[in-house]
Image: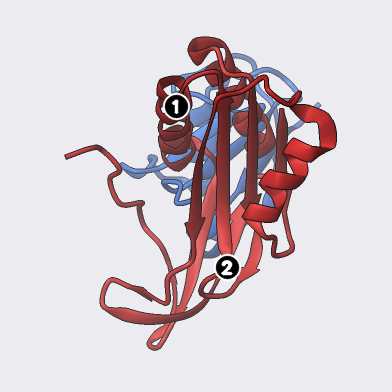
Chain colours: A red, B blue
C-alpha cells in the first residue's frame, strides 16, 4: 500500500506502472486494477478558473487516507492500494487525485475504487481555493458522487 | 499543558486565526474551546477534530489535545 500527499505535479499513469513494476505486486497475482484519476477543470459554477490552491490538514489527512485504504483492503479483500493526492498550487488539466485498487477479480476492484474515492471526497481534510475571473473563491462543497 | 487549536481554509481567513493556544480547563468540551476563541456558538456547517479524528462539539477534551476547526472538505 502506498499513500502520498504530493506538492508537485505527477503523471498518474506512470505512477501506476512504476508501482506495479516496483515489486509491490507480484506478477500474475492480480486480475484487475480499477483506477480513478481526478483532474482540475478550467471552469466551475459558470466561471473560468485559471488555477487553484489545495490546502490540507497535515497529519490528519495522511491518517485518513491510510485508514480508508486499510478499510477497503480488508472489506473488499484487495491485493493492494495506491492513493496520491496533490496539494499546493494546481493548474487546469493537472491530475489532483489518483486512487488505484488491485484485486483478483473486477468486482472488488471496481467497488473498492469507487468507495475509497467517495470516502475521500466526503471526509478527507482538503480544501480548494479557486482563482476565478472575478477573484479567489473557496469551494464550498463537493458535487454529489452517488450513482443515479 | 495548553490546548493547541488550528483553523483551516475559509475559516482561518475569516477568523484571522491559523493556530492559537487555549488554556485547558477540567471537563472542557470542543464547543467550550470554540466559544473561548470566538465568543460565539458554532455555525451550522462547522466541522471539528480532536487529535486528527472527527468529533462532535460535545466531545470532552484532555489536557494537551490538538483541536481543529474547519469548513466542509472539498478535496479529490
Position of residue A21 in the picture relative to residue A35 (left or right): right
Name the residue rendered at 68%, 23% in the picture.
A28
**Depicted B18 relative to depicted A47: above or below:** above
Residue bearing the label numbered 1? B57
Establish if B30 lies above or below A57.
above
- Disc tally is 2
Q: Nearer the viewer, residue A72 or B37?
A: A72
Kindly give the residue lying farthest to the left in the view shown: A148
Foreground disc of the pair 1, 2: 2
Residue A138 location, quadrant = bottom left
Residue labelled with disc 2: A94
Report in which chain the residue with disc 2 lies: A
Q: CA distance from mark 1 to mark 2?
A: 37 Å
**The N terminus of chain B appears in which quarter of the rendering?**
top right
Judge the density around disc 2: few (<14), some (14-19), many (≥20) Cα neighbours within 10 Å: some
On the rendered structure, is A133 left or right of A24?
left
Counting from the top left corner in percent of width and height, residue A40 is at 48, 66
Amino acid at each position: 500500500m502506498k499513500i502520498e500527499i504530493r506538492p508537485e505535479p505527477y503523471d498518474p499513469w506512470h505512477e501506476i506502472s512504476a508501482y506495479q513494476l516496483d515489486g509491490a505486486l507480484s506478477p500474475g497475482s492480480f486480475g484487475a486494477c480499477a483506477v480513478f484519476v481526478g483532474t482540475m477543470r478550467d471552469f466551475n459554477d459558470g466561471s473560468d478558473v485559471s488555477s487553484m490552491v489545495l490546502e490540507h490538514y497535515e497529519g490528519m489527512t495522511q491518517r485518513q487516507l491510510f485508514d480508508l485504504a486499510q478499510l477497503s483492503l480488508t472489506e473488499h479483500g484487495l491485493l493492494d492500494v495506491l492513493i496520491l493526492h496533490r496539494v499546493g498550487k494546481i493548474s487546469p488539466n493537472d491530475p489532483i487525485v489518483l486512487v488505484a485498487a488491485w484485486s483478483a477479480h473486477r468486482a472488488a476492484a471496481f467497488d473498492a475504487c469507487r468507495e475509497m474515492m467517495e470516502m475521500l471526497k466526503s471526509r478527507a481534510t482538503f480544501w480548494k481555493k479557486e482563482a476565478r475571473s472575478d477573484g479567489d473563491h473557496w469551494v464550498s462543497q463537493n458535487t454529489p458522487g452517488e450513482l443515479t | 499543558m495548553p490546548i493547541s487549536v488550528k483553523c483551516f481554509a475559509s475559516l482561518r481567513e475569516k477568523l484571522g486565526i491559523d493556530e492559537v493556544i487555549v488554556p485547558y480547563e477540567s471537563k472542557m468540551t470542543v464547543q467550550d474551546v470554540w466559544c473561548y476563541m470566538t465568543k460565539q456558538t458554532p455555525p451550522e456547517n462547522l466541522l471539528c477534530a480532536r487529535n486528527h479524528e472527527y468529533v462532535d462539539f460535545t466531545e470532552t477534551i484532555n489536557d494537551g489535545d490538538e483541536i481543529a476547526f474547519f469548513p466542509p472538505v472539498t478535496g479529490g
